[in-house]
Image (tube, rainbow, N blue to C red):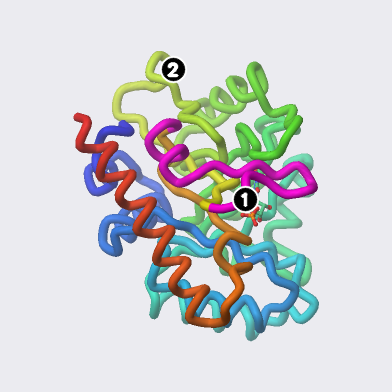
Amino acid sequence: TTLLPYSERIKLHTNPTAKKILEIMDRKKTNLAVSVDVNTASEALEVIRRVGSSVCMVKTHVDIFEDFTESFVEELVKLSKELDFVIFEDRKFADIGNTVSLQYSSGIHKIANWADLTNAHSVPGPGIIAGLSKIGEPLGRGLLLLAEMSSKGSLAVDGYTEETFKMAQEAGRSFVIGFIAQNRIDKSDLIKDGEDYLIMSPGVGLGAKGDSLGQQYRTPRECIIDSGSDVIIVGRGIYGIKGGEQAVKDEAERYRIEGWKAYEERISKK
Ligand code: UP6
């Protein structure tokens, strides 16, 4: 389905979050997600106000914030409505079903209450999907499985990636809507008629090729055209840009335009 426009893939999904993501992408002409990995919730909100109109999704790691409160969540949800984006908490759950259902619904963060989308490692087996879906599916939330990672030396390759795809396929698409991956892992010989998955790729940058801790960057074009990703996820490349408020806003627009041009080129190959 990589050659289909996002708008034509909406009907291939039943999950409300998957539909919403594709609708926003089509409406705002953006396949950009910004990852706001800053130290405080207040800084994160400032970044979001600057980049919100350029993105389909804002990705958070709320366990990084020193000042997480319920009012952060209220403001984030308000901005998501005003600026029209989906909220993705990059929690990377990785435990047995019972534990993850508690981690997802409870604690300080109560992720299921406000995050449209979250993600999980497949390493514990299908119980992790069952545990999370018990909480998230009735709320219309979506889940991505991590099938590959952007970091050097990742063990999520080959058989692990293939088994992760199969695990998602067996769970059905009412809750699992896609993958964090570096490639189009839903290969044509595996995918069934009418099935569609969203592939979201972190490790995207127009400048540096990596960092000192194993991160590896590819350009938006490499992700979208060469690898067939649907959504590019950019963190430091956008919020870390020097030059103040306007520079962050401009950089988000630059990535949006790059990502959208690549997508238009991809679908024109039909
Ligand atoms: N992330 C990756 N690679 C993965 C999965 N997730 O980088 O395979 C997340 C990181 C970070 C963001 O946790 O929040 O994507 C990338 O940030 P960066 O653009 O600043 O490197």
Which residue is the site of mark 1? 208
Task: Indicate left or right for 188 with 48 as reference.
Answer: left
Label 1 – label 2 distance at C-alpha: 35 Å
Residue 139 locus on image (x, y percent): 50, 59
Question: Considering only vertical position in the picture, is 145 above or below 65?
Answer: above
The amino acid pointed to by label 1 is Ala
What residue range appears in magenta? 207-227
Instruction: Tell me the residue at 58%/80% (across/down).
Output: 45
On the image, which quarter does residue 229 sit in?
A: top left
- For residue 201, say whether it is visible: yes
Measured as percent of width and height from the top left, residue 75 is found at 55, 83
Q: Earlier in the sequence, mark 1 or mark 2?
A: 2
Image: 170 above or below 251: above
Residue 208 on the magenta segment: yes
Q: Which mark is residue 190?
A: 2
Q: Residue 270 versus residue 115: which sits nearer the camera?
A: 270
